[in-house]
Amino acid sequence: MVETPDALLGTFAVLQALSGFIPVPLLDGVVSRRIARSMVETVAGTHGVRLPEEEVKLLASEPDEGFFAFLKSAAKGILMFPLRLLFKAIFLVLDAKEVTELVGRSYARGVALDVAFGEGLYMKYGAERIATAVEAALATVDTRPLKRGSQAAWAALKERGPLLFERIVGAFKESKEDDAKTAAAPLGDAFAGGIAPEREVLRESLRKGLYASLGESPAAAPLA
């Protein structure tokens, strides 16, 4: 079965976190929603599905408001740091438990949707049932092991230095999310490498959760 690459799902996940550093009031929320919707469209497109706009919005549920409020508040605080300290300071935020959970949950949502589109569940049940089933599956899965993905992504960002961070945030400020996604691709690659030992267990847990929420018993996992 065709699957959306983990590196691509990881890129969307880390961009959710980095969108909190946009120093423009309200724009961070706008960009976050665009990233979430782009992820849904990308996953659907992997499986040859083109979604109506309303279904994209439905499946791209907002990140947990508590986590995202923390992210925005913390990020805005360090944006007042002197430039020479700013790049080091962002990792105080990115390493926080709340941000790690936000990134892990974003990645897990992408995996759940990938299963739903790839195994025909969307075509069978429709967007509304799938949106509910995804939320139910996410509620049963422990995403804490995905911390390794976040750690690997932020290590890659540190290695590449402040210019990459500035390039991503600059693209956000100009509403060029595709440019931000291209710039963040190495971070998505690092995320995928970091979660590689956990990915099959997580994927199967999400798969079982989806089927259970839909009242079905999953058959053996299809071959990739």
Image (cartoon, rainbow, N blue to C red):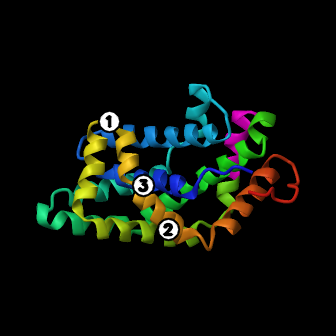
> On the image, numbered disc 2 is attached to which residue?
149
At numbered mark 3, what does the secondary structure look like: helix, strand or loop?
A: helix
Q: Residue at x 32, y 36 (%)?
A: 175
For this rendering, which residue is in front, 93 or 73?
Answer: 93
Q: Are marks 3 and 2 in contact (CB under 8 Å)?
A: no
Answer left or right for 127 relative to 6. Answer: right
- Check residue 185 in the rendering and tell me which mark sits there, or answer none: 3
CA–CA distance between discs 2 and 1?
26 Å
- Check residue 122 in the rendering and tell me which mark sits there, or answer none: none
> On the image, numbered disc 1 is attached to which residue?
175
Q: Residue at x 73, y 63 (%)?
A: 205
Find residue 21 and report its horizontal and vertical position in percent: 29, 52
Mark yes or no: residue 79 visible.
yes
Magenta span = 126-136
Q: Quadrant of residue 6?
A: bottom right
Find residue 116 and report its horizontal and vertical position in percent: 72, 45
